[in-house]
Every structure is written in structure tokens, then in C-alpha cells.
Image: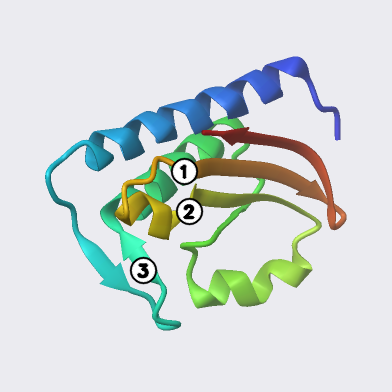
Amino acid sequence: MNLTQELLNKTLAIAEQAGKKILEIYQRDNFEIQKKADHSPLTEADLAAHEYISAELATITPNIPVLSEESSKAEIADRKNWPVLWLVDPLDGTKEFIHRSGEFTVNIALIVNHQPVLGVVTV
């Protein structure tokens, strides 16, 4: 796979825009919080960032699947069969987000043959 500066720049722009969407929710007086099956929190910011990142990555690399912390169980179970994928944590630090510590990130990595070959983290 030919990795280019353009792909890195587009990935970084997606992460930065997802961060802006997260901050819009963060700055509100309240936001929706749910519980996942494992009882960890899930906010509307997690879901908004997941949806945005997934859609945008699909536009720049339509043949590469996205595996996100918010992906379905079926997608997660299939991941071992994917030689190339985007691995995403749309809001790393959900508990910090909820407690308004300001310490959370957006993480996006391109994985090829089980090895990270490109990654961005935005604060």
C-alpha cells in the first residue's frame, strides 16, 4: 500500500474535525450518557465522532473497512479476517470527557497485516 502525505493530511483533518464535533457537545450544559454491555459509559459525543470518522474514512478509502470501539459485535468478530483496516477510537477518554477534565483524544490508525502503518492522535 502506498502511503502518502496526502492520506496522512486527510486523516489528520478527519480527526481534527471529529474533535470539533466532540467539543461542541462537551461545551453544552448536558449531554446524553448511556451504558455499554460492559457497563462502560457511551456518550453522544462518542457516537457523533464514530459516525463522522467512519463516513469520512469511507470517502477517502472506500475499500478499507473501519473498526471502531463503537462498531457492531459482528464487525469486531470479523476483524481477524481483515488484512487492511482503519482502527478508530473516536473518543478515547470517555470518563474524562464526562468528568470534564479536558483529557481525551481522537485516535485513528491504518493497520496493514496486523501492523500500524499510519496513525494520528488529536487532543
Where is residue 62 shown, x and y percent of the image?
59, 40
Q: Secondary structure at mark 1?
A: loop
Q: Position of residue 99 (x, y in %)?
A: 32, 54
Q: Are marks 1 and 2 in contact (CB under 8 Å)?
A: yes
Q: Nearer the viewer, mark 1 or mark 2?
A: 1
Q: Position of residue 96 (x, y in %)?
A: 41, 53
List the residue tagged with mark 2.
93
Real-space Cα separation, disc 2 to disc 3, in angstroms = 10 Å
Amino acid marked by disc 3:
Pro
**Sequence-first tag of 1 and 2:** 2
Residue located at (46% from left, 62% from top): 70
Residue located 70% across and 51% down the image: 85
Q: Mark 1 — residue?
A: 103
Marks 2,3: beta carbons within 8 A? no
Give left or right: position of 5 versus 31: right
Local packing at callout 3 (Cα closer than 10 Å; few below 14, some 14-19, many 20+) is some
The colour scheme applied to this rendered structure is: rainbow
Q: Residues within 10 Å of mark 2 (few under 14, many from 20)?
A: some
For marks 2 and 3 on the same chain, the one whose residue lies earlier in the sequence = 3
For the residue carrying disc 1, how many other residues have a C-alpha within 10 Å: few (<14), some (14-19), or many (20+)? few
Secondary structure category for the residue under label 2: loop
Q: Is residue 54 left or right of residue 35?
A: right
> What residue is drawn where x is 40% and y is 44%?
49
| Residue placed under numbered mark 3 in the picture | 41
